[in-house]
Image (spheres, grey):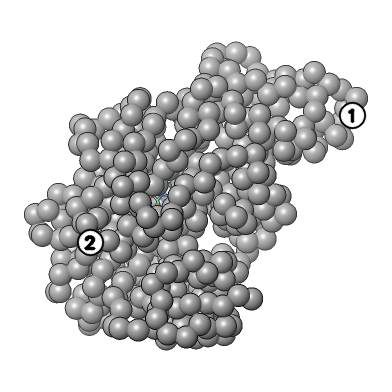
Amino acid sequence: MGGKQINMGKREKVILVTGATGFLGSAITQRLLVSGCKLRLLIRKRENNTSPISFGREGLIKELILGNELDEYSQGQSRVIGDQLNNDKLLHELFFSNVEVYEGDITSGSLGLGKQEYKRLCNEVDEVFHCAAVTHFEMQGADEHVVVNIKGTENVLQFANFGKQKRLHYISTAYVAGKQNGIIYENEMRSEPLFNNEYERSKFVAERLVIKYAKSNDIPYTIYRPGIIVGDSRTGATCKFDNLYLFVKVLFNIENSFIKNKSEDLDDITIRVPGDPDALINLVPIDYVADAIVAILKKSESIGGIYHITNPNPPRLCELRDLVMTLLEIKGIDVKIDRELEKRSLSTVEKLFLRQTRSYYSYLFSRLRFDDSSTQAILRGTGVICPTMTKELVAVLIDFAVTHNWGEGKRTVLQKV
Ligand SMILES: NC(=O)c1ccc[n+]([C@@H]2O[C@H](COP(=O)([O-])OP(=O)(O)OC[C@H]3O[C@@H](n4cnc5c(N)ncnc54)[C@H](OP(=O)(O)O)[C@@H]3O)[C@@H](O)[C@H]2O)c1
């Protein structure tokens, strides 16, 4: 294991993080921890768990957040004071000395904390990093997106405004742009567009709320709008297997079960999938998203700014299709992207494909381009660059997903937490 360099110097900021158990939140938490910040993690209280947070659960949360990736993350840290730390034990000790875990819920007015605890945190915390959200696109509960993403953000804003003045970092999404087309600029305030789903709508409303509330209460704020996040560009590591992974998994399964088992010598099968071949799929690796956000967060000039954490050169849908087909070595099947698919009568396989990927349907037609000039300007000189979606990178992502069985094993670990 290589040497780890951790900032052990002057008093560091105390940052309250929401969503630290999530895909992006855990990557950000790792980086903030390594750079020496003191962290207060608001972790969602599990139903039926009335006891105070147990050491066992805290241990699981630590594992979930630190994972196996910390070694690589800490290599690149530049703000370094003190000796190099050479083993995991010290890092894990750092977690226990610099991190406090609070069970709560952003949907509750007091964030689900006790009165005293809430007050104490309000006066202790210097910055709030609000990352928690409902991120699926399906309508499960009638107003789940409203309650968690809008009302939850309102509660976090009130926390930021109560007691000591705090800086607020809010994770939005590039897709607050909804069903618009063309170029979307970072600081452009357009009127409310049409949306593809309730997730987009709730994130749009929450973002507007952040700007309005922060401006009228003098809260220094920064908004980050990531594109579609995929695994780590170097290792492929991800704990979330949605978006790109769903499509690849369906193709992978079709190849494995349908073609291989039933009709080995069959070729020239055409499977039509919905979409516009020229749609732009704005995939961004998690390491770029987290590195960029942490680099921006540390700069005071980012106050009041909105940053697209997006891919400046997103692949077109047809390019991605070709890469995936080559990498999965699928022969004998022609995957055709069809703009009018829903009007046609479908084969069983096509129905299966559509059923399993339906919630992403509209993104297969998107021509949105995200201008990221503010992000590029502020990242200049930091060495943080968005990797291009090359064949090699897509191979790393798919390889991780296949060797980790599309997250099936991980799910049981997450359920324990
Ligand atoms: N993933 C993407 O492609 C993407 C793209 C653009 C923007 N974003 C934004 O990035 C942020 C993080 O997304 P993600 O993909 O990392 O999501 P994720 O993996 O689904 O994680 C969501 C996090 O929010 C927490 N949470 C949900 N409801 C909560 C509640 N009521 N109280 C407290 N915590 C709650 C979850 O806690 P549990 O662990 O208890 O469920 C989890 O830690 C979100 O704001 C999302 O809108 C994501």
User: Which corner quadrant of the image does residue 323 belong to?
Assistant: top right
Q: Residue at horizontal 60%, vertical 39%?
A: 390
**Distance between mark 1 and mark 2 Cα atoms:** 61 Å
Q: Is residue 226 above or below residue 104?
A: above
Q: Residue at horizontal 39%, vertical 81%?
A: 81
Q: Residue at horizontal 36%, vertical 60%?
A: 295
The amino acid beneath tag 1 is: Glu
Q: Nearer the viewer, residue 380 or 59?
A: 380
The earlier-in-sequence mark between 1 and 2 is 1
- Is residue 9 among the parts visible in the rendering? yes
The amino acid beneath tag 2 is: Ser
User: Which corner quadrant of the image does residue 168 belong to?
Assistant: bottom left
Image position, residue 61 (x, y; %): 50, 73
Q: Which-is-in-front pick, marks 1 and 2?
A: 2
Q: Nearer the viewer, residue 8 or 89?
A: 8
Q: Residue at horizontal 62%, vertical 37%?
A: 247
Q: Across the whole image, how many numbered discs are drawn on residues?
A: 2
Image position, residue 325 (x, y; %): 70, 32
Name the residue carrying label 1: 264
Task: Name the secondary structure under disc 2.
Answer: helix
Q: What crowding class fits label 1: few (fewer than 14 Cα within 10 Å), some (14-19), or many (20 or more)? A: few
Task: Name the secondary structure under disc 1.
Answer: loop
Name the residue carrying label 2: 300
